[in-house]
Amino acid sequence: MARDSPRDRAAALAPLLKALGDEHRLAMVMLLAEGPRTVKEVQDATGLGQTLVSHHLKALPERGLVSATAHGRSNRYELCCEALAAPVRSLGELVTSVQQAA
C-alpha cells in the first residue's frame, strides 16, 4: 500500500475526527477558530464549568489539534493551524445555511 494512500490518510484522520466528535469539544474548537482563548474565556463563551472545559481541552492537545501556552496562572489555548481553523469556520457557516434553508 502506498505511504500516502487514502486509506493511510483516513487511518490518520480518524482519531482527529473522533476528538472533534464530542459536541463540547467541537464547540471549543469552533470558538478557538476565532482566536486563542484562556480556560475562563472558553467557560464564559460556552457556559460550561471549569472542570468540564479543562477535561475537554486536555484531549485536544493530545491529538495535536490545539496548543497550550502559559498565560499568567492559566493556559491560553489556540488551534494548531489554519488547516483546521478554516474548515471549522466553514462548517459553522454550513449549519447557518442549512438552518436558514429549512
Image: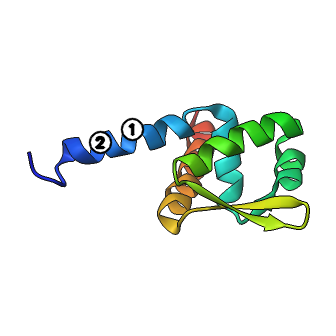
Residue drawn at x 55%, y 40% as measured from the top left: 20
Q: Give residue 58's position: percent from left, percent from top.
A: 68, 44
Q: Give the residue number, with chain letter if any, for mark 2.
A: 10
Kind of residue indicated by mark 1: Ala
Colour scheme of the picture: rainbow
Please identify the quarter of the rendering in which residue 1 is found: top left
**Can the viewer see residue 48 in this picture?**
no
Kind of residue indicated by mark 2: Ala
Disc 2 + disc 1, Cβ < 8 Å: yes
Residue drawn at x 86%, y 58% as measured from the top left: 74
Nearest the viewer among 97 and 57 is 57
Identify the mark at residue 93; answer none if there is no mark: none
Q: Give the residue number, with chain letter if any, for mark 1.
A: 14
Q: Give residue 45's position: percent from left, percent from top.
A: 85, 49
Q: Is residue 7 above or below residue 79?
A: above
Nearest the viewer among 95 and 20 is 20
Please identify the quarter of the rendering in which residue 55 is found: top right
**Can the viewer see residue 77 in this picture?**
yes
